[in-house]
């Protein structure tokens, strides 16, 4: 009996290190691969996601991952791990499974000559959770650093101008956001604003400059707000706006 075996196609690590998109063909709705550092050591618990499809998985102890049930066509696979610069590759899904190797570049533990303290470490973990929720599609509306830069503005309200279900009101520092519906049917709900994992009383969206933000999450009601941001829900269940600051020294 004769079998036809097609070779596995591996993405070039050098191209990944240069930040170039690496295209690998995948078929049969599956993409498999490994994630390692520049020395070839496998990276465990790296997040591997196709954000547009809300598919997320993590690498095992050998740095391996598998994404299955993928529709045919081109997809962007994003790879993130705390302590490493994030990266992405393009894959084209056809009929058979192919595999790719991805090399992540370690980020220095020192920012601007100052060792990272506990608060910065917590912020870094919070940002990784932000990207994880975005990959899963947990019911919110997400804006990344790239989205913010694309608007070329210092006012955060300008970034959120096209966000669904919001209305803007004038505040002392610029503009604030009100959700246009609540669980009780009330319009113009005032959401609770969280900054770096902590609720902030009396804060409005333009109190934080867009240039200082890494990511924003909008949750328009109690049913879509993650548990950790539901602890300070107001009586109208108006949801939450979650803001994550940029890590000092990060480009």
Image (spheres, rainbow, N blue to C red):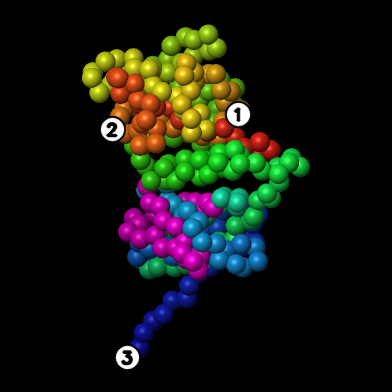
Residue 240 seen by the camera: yes
Q: Secondary structure at mark 3?
A: loop
Q: Secondary structure at mark 1?
A: helix
- Callout 2: 10 Å neighbours few (<14), some, many (20+)? few
Coordinates of residue 162 in the picture (x, y in percent): 42, 24
Marks 3 and 1: CB-CB under 8 Å?
A: no
Decide which of tag 3 and tag 1 comes sooner along the chain.
3
- Mark seen at residue 223: 2
Q: CA distance from mark 3 to mark 1?
A: 63 Å
Vertical position of residue 68 compared to residue 19: above or below = below
Question: In the visual, does 105 lie left or right of 191?
Answer: right
Q: Quadrant of the N terminus?
A: bottom left
Residue segment shown in magenta: 54-81
User: On the image, numbered disc 3 is attached to which residue?
Assistant: 1
Q: CA distance from mark 3 to mark 2?
A: 57 Å
Snapshot quadrant of residue 184 = top left
Marks 3 and 2: CB-CB under 8 Å?
A: no
Please tell me whether mark 3 or mark 2 is closer to you in this view. Answer: 2
Vertical position of residue 62 compared to residue 118: above or below = below
Coordinates of residue 157 in the picture (x, y in percent): 50, 20
User: On the image, numbered disc 1 is attached to which residue?
Assistant: 212
């Amino acid at each position: 009996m004769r079998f036809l075996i097609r070779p596995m196609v591996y993405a070039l690590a050098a191209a990944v290190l240069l930040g170039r998109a690496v295209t690998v063909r995948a078929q049969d709705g599956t993409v498999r691969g490994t994630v390692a550092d520049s020395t070839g050591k496998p990276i465990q618990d790296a997040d591997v996601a196709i954000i547009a499809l809300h598919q997320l998985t993590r690498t095992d102890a050998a740095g391996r991952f598998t994404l299955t049930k993928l529709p045919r066509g081109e997809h962007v696979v994003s790879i993130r791990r705390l302590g490493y610069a994030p990266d992405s590759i393009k894959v084209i899904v056809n009929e058979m499974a192919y595999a790719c190797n991805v090399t992540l570049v370690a980020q220095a533990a020192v920012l601007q000559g100052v060792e990272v303290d506990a608060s910065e470490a917590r912020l870094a973990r919070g940002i990784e959770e932000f990207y994880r929720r975005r990959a899963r599609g947990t019911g919110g509306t997400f804006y990344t650093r790239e989205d913010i830069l694309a608007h070329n503005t210092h006012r955060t309200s300008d970034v959120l101008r096209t966000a669904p279900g919001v209305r803007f009101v004038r505040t002392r520092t610029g503009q604030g956001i009100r959700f246009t519906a609540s669980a009780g049917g009330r319009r113009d709900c005032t959401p609770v604003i969280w900054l770096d994992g902590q609720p902030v009383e009396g804060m409005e969206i333009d109190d934080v400059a867009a240039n200082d933000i890494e990511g924003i999450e909008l949750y328009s009601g109690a049913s879509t707000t993650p548990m950790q941001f539901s602890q300070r829900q107001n009586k109208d269940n108006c949801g939450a706006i979650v803001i994550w600051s940029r890590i000092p020294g990060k480009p």
